[in-house]
């Protein structure tokens, strides 16, 4: 890893540790407020759950993927508010994983949306996996997808209910992990941020951001201030472009899985995502 990247990550880790310490001091071991739910995310049509990358991830991620982590590059490093939300969730999940996951599932059910679990971070222990599975069983109509690099926790997920779609997220060259995940019956993905949009979500998001910047530039030229231009550009772009997680839609903008759908490349399970999207559109 390059020296300046190492230094940047070290600074980011120090900030994250400070955030964690502050939330620990604030909560004093009590589940004193609800976790931050990324709902109303019109771009991705899902409920997002995230904890701090690196801090909650597999210990070897610092060497293997932190430098190319899209969560760190898109959210945690450039956006202090995102970092704080991830820190708050990290601490609340450690305090009471059952209450933590129940909150996300309840909100997703209320909004008729799927959940993207571990959008940042990962499971830290088996207790958290069990709490997540228990919440999924209590809310069989809520579909959720998660990618984990915790190979040691995959056995805990083997018998998870069918509405919880778990995938092993492999590093390049992680043949042993891949083989083990496949032996246990999991799908394997390789999602790496290299700034070029090499995964469906990133390609789709890159398209969204390019259009948003274009509109913002036009609005600035018309005399709007930067903040107002950005806000209006976001709204305008949302009307034009959906950020897809479905591989087909992300690559071809084909809409094969339905308006507002977020299938995350999950195959099977009938048309649950389409139904969820239709419900949302109907309000
Ligand atoms: S890529 Fe995933 S495992 Fe690696 S640091 Fe980012 S969130 Fe953690």
Image (cartoon, rainbow, N blue to C red):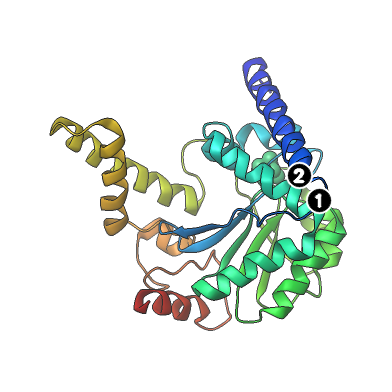
Q: How far across and down, in percent of the image, does residue 207 sit?
A: 35, 47
- The answer to whether mark 1 is within 8 Å of ligand 1 is no
> For mark 2, does the 10 Å Cα neighbourhood hold few (<14), some (14 to 19), or many (20 or more) residues?
some
Q: How far across and down, in percent of the image, does residue 259 sit?
A: 36, 71
Give whichever of 122, 247 is nearer the camera.
Answer: 122
Q: Quadrant of residue 181?
A: bottom right
Q: Which residue is mark 1?
A: 124
Q: Is residue 100 above or below residue 20?
A: below
Quadrant where the N terminus sits is top right
Q: Name the element at disc 2.
A: loop
Residue found farthest to the left: 222
Q: Name the element at disc 1.
A: loop
Q: How far across and down, in percent of the image, does residue 278 sit?
A: 39, 78
Tell me the residue at 48%/54% (across/down): 200
The label shown at residue 184 is none
Give whichever of 24, 49 is nearer the camera.
Answer: 24
The label shown at residue 56 is 2
* Any part of residue 204 in sight: yes
Tell me the residue at 47%/47% (across/down): 202
Give whichever of 192, 277 is nearer the camera.
Answer: 277
* Any part of residue 266 in sight: no
Give whichever of 46, 109 is nearer the camera.
Answer: 109
């Amino acid at each position: 890893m390059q020296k300046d990247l190492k230094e940047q990550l070290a600074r980011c880790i120090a900030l994250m540790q400070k955030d964690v310490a502050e939330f620990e001091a604030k909560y004093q071991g009590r589940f004193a407020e609800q976790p931050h739910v990324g709902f109303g995310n019109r771009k991705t049509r899902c409920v997002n759950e995230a904890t701090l990358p690196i801090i909650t991830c597999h210990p070897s991620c610092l060497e293997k993927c932190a430098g190319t982590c899209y969560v760190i590059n898109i959210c945690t490093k450039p956006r202090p508010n995102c970092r704080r939300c991830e820190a708050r969730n990290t601490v609340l999940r450690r305090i009471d994983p059952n209450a933590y996951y129940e909150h996300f599932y309840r909100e997703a059910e209320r909004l008729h949306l799927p959940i993207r679990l571990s959008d940042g971070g990962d499971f830290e222990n088996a207790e958290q996996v069990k709490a997540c599975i228990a919440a999924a069983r209590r809310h069989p109509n809520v579909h959720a997808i998660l990618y984990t690099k915790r190979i040691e926790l995959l056995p805990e997920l083997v018998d998870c209910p069918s509405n919880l779609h778990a995938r092993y997220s492999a590093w390049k060259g992680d043949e042993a992990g891949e083989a083990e995940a496949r032996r246990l019956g999991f799908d394997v993905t390789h999602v790496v941020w290299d700034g070029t949009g090499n995964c469906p979500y990133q390609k789709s998001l890159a398209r969204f951001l390019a259009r948003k910047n274009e509109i913002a530039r036009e609005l600035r030229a018309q005399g709007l201030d930067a903040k107002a231009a950005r806000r209006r550009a976001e709204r305008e772009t949302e009307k034009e472009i959906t950020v897809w997680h479905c591989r087909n839609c992300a690559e071809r903008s084909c809409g094969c899985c339905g308006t507002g759908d977020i299938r995350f490349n999950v195959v099977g399970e009938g048309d649950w995502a389409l139904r969820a999207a239709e419900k949302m559109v109907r309000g």
